[in-house]
Amino acid sequence: MSTFPEITARAWNECRLLDAVLELTHRCNFDCFYCYNDRSLQNWPLKYDEYCDLMEQLAEMAVLNLTLTGGEPLVHPDFFAIGARAKDLGFVIRLKSNGHLLRGDVVKRLKDEVAPYQIDLSVHGATAEVHDRQTQHSGSFDRLLENIDEMSSLGLRMKLNCTLTAWNEKEVEEIFNLADRLGLLLNFNATVSPKDNGDITPMSLAPTPEGISRLARVVGRRREEAQKREREDG
């Protein structure tokens, strides 16, 4: 049986598609200030049967990883049917979500019907003040932490994603500390883009040069500390 690095190398050498991302919807239950999605955009999503046909073609091409994203993918009316079909086709499924709906029956259905390999959750700060300011949804930070606890109890694998902005750049270290307390990996993205319709309003929240430098210093220091621990343990 081939290892994952061997599969990746073969896909690269043979110019084969290994990963695919399906943006199911532009709709979202948040209105994050920096988001590039134009929520007013009139579009015509694929029908469920069309998604199934697309995923079957991807499976025939031996695509391994399938990411379901949006907008907020969970607000798509056929999300569970699409996810279940992806599971049946054998994809390694990743879900990108703001996490707000992932509780109770919804998260139980997600585990049973979709069985994602990993859930990538958006975090926007180390405090409710900063996180909720960016999502423009009061209570979203506390609910995210509650939902992470519930998903952890169900054995679901999660990772945190954070877009660096002028509002959260002073909390970089605290955001890493939050991820450590939760036992989750954290990935930062330092790029803020205009909206799909050309609106440059999100760019007003782009991180400052000082904020980007702060992130680089924190990442560098944490990498050195991890390497030191590895040497000591070895």
Image (tube, rainbow, N blue to C red):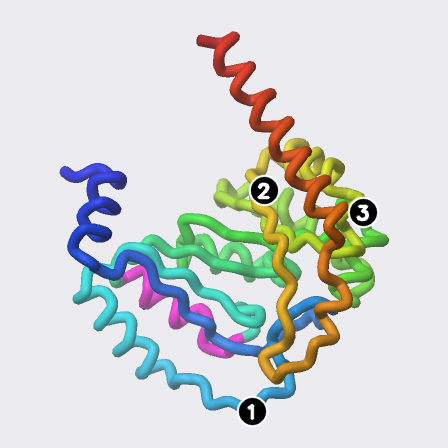
Q: Quadrant of the C terminus?
A: top left
Residue at x-position 62% and y-position 35%: 219
Q: How far apart are marks 2 and 3 (CA)?
A: 16 Å
Q: In this view, does 188 lie above or below 36?
A: above
Mark before the other along the chain sequence, 1 or 3? 1
Find disc 1 in the rendering and name its residue: 42
Residue 82 inside the magenta-drawn segment = yes
The part of the chain drawn in magenta is 76-88
Residue farthest to the right, as pictured: 129
Q: Give the quadrant of residue 104.
A: bottom right
For marks 2 and 3, the one nearer the N-term is 3
Residue under the point 49% across and 15% down: 230
- Please name the amino acid that badge 2 sits on: Leu
Badge 2, how many Cα within 10 Å: few under 14, some, many 20+?
many
Q: Is residue 64 left or right of residue 28?
A: left
Residue bearing the label numbered 2: 186
User: Disc 3 marks which residue?
Assistant: 127
Q: What x and y, as percent, mark residue 204? A: 77, 67
Q: Is residue 118 above or below residue 182?
A: below
